[in-house]
Amino acid sequence: MEKGWNGLPYYSISDRYKSVFGAKVYKIPVAVVDDCPNRLGLKGMQTCSFCDVWGSAARSEAFELPLVEQINKYRDHIRNKFKAEKFLVYFQAYTNSFAKINDLEKNFKDALLCGQDIAGFVIGTRPDCLSMSLFKLWQHYHEQTYVSVELGIQSFYEDDLEFFRRGHKASESLHAIKRIKELTSVDLGIHLIFGSPYETDERIKESALICNELPITNVKLHNLHVLKNTALEVLYNKGEFTPISLDLYAHRVQIFLENLRPDIAIHRLSAFSSRYDELIAPAWTNNKMGTHQAIIDHLRRESSYQSRFYQPKTDSEILKIKDLAIQGLPKTSPESSLNLL
Ligand code: SF4
């Protein structure tokens, strides 16, 4: 029997936002940084094997506009299309801590001045681009608004990270998560990529178990896909990398969700290519809604749902999980409205 979160077999980030904000909240993706340590080749790093020229941003056309214009443009679009009531400004493209603190602060100030319906920020960054001044900045804004940080850790396994050419180790990811939670109260999430050549069912299960031990409130899942002009395209053309099928990907998502804590919200079940002409493979990544529905259908066929096999060991562990999740929320949020465990 499927466990339901508003009819879905998993706890979606929109459900979580409704609990936190009491309103329909959408993210406005913006681009304010145009580089990262990998792309600059710092310390011998290389561009991540899957990353295209847009730095994993969803909307390349926004790059030319000033921040406030980006927010106004996409806010109108999202409000009309989805009837959104509040918005989170999502600093998504490239590495959003890879800039001068004064510039980052100005971006936050400008974004908040865009209106009462701006409910906060979501900041995408890497585990190895953090500093004390950044933590102070995040914490300062956390006192005024909602601040969420999404760390692109991608995998807990070193061979995957090398294959992705991330340039950081899994231990650095865990250390970064620990430091962020020790030094700030921001909401914390991670990104994971499924589909590396080293991946196994057992690893996926273990990744969920690791997530359960972390003070995170959300996870974003991506399938590894091949874009034009990436290192992965070279491997693909040489026959040295084959993306996993949709069936296998859905199976891996199932294993992950079944072992995941019930209070960890899921941003989405897979990646999709927003620039259709840049996708090399697999073709199923181009069909955003079709892929989402295929994974949902798979979960339903298997009578599967998030946390199906998750077993908290003791009452104190449950309390600890609740405490960790609550710590990430803005001080203005009513804890009683949280939909945890
Ligand atoms: S994925 Fe992020 S860190 Fe990697 S090269 Fe692209 S922008 Fe840089």
Image (cartoon, grey):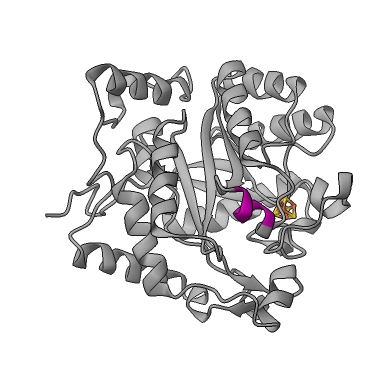
The residue nearer to you, when weighing 52 against 312, is: 312
Is 255 rendered above or below residue 294? above
Can residue 43 be seen by looking at this rendering?
A: yes
Residue shown at 48%/25% (left/top)?
Answer: 328
Can residue 34 be seen by looking at this rendering?
A: no
Q: Quadrant of the N terminus?
A: bottom left
- Number of labels in the image equals 0
Residue shown at 25%/26% (left/top)?
Answer: 313
Q: Residue 22, image x and y in percent?
A: 35, 34
The residue nearer to you, when weighing 311 against 187, is: 311
The picture quadrant where one finds residue 56 is bottom right
Left of 25 or right of it: where is 282? right
Q: Residue 329, image x and y in percent?
A: 46, 25
Left of 69 or right of it: where is 241? left
Is 303 rendered above or below residue 179? below
The picture quadrant where one finds residue 160 is bottom right
Residue shown at 74%/47% (left/top)?
Answer: 167
- Per the rendered image, the range of residues in magenta is 158-162
Q: Quadrant of the C terminus?
A: top left
Is 138 rendered above or below residue 160? above
Q: Residue 194, image x and y in percent?
A: 50, 59
The residue nearer to you, when weighing 129 against 232, is: 232
Q: Is residue 238 magenta?
A: no
**Extreme residue in the left direction:** 1
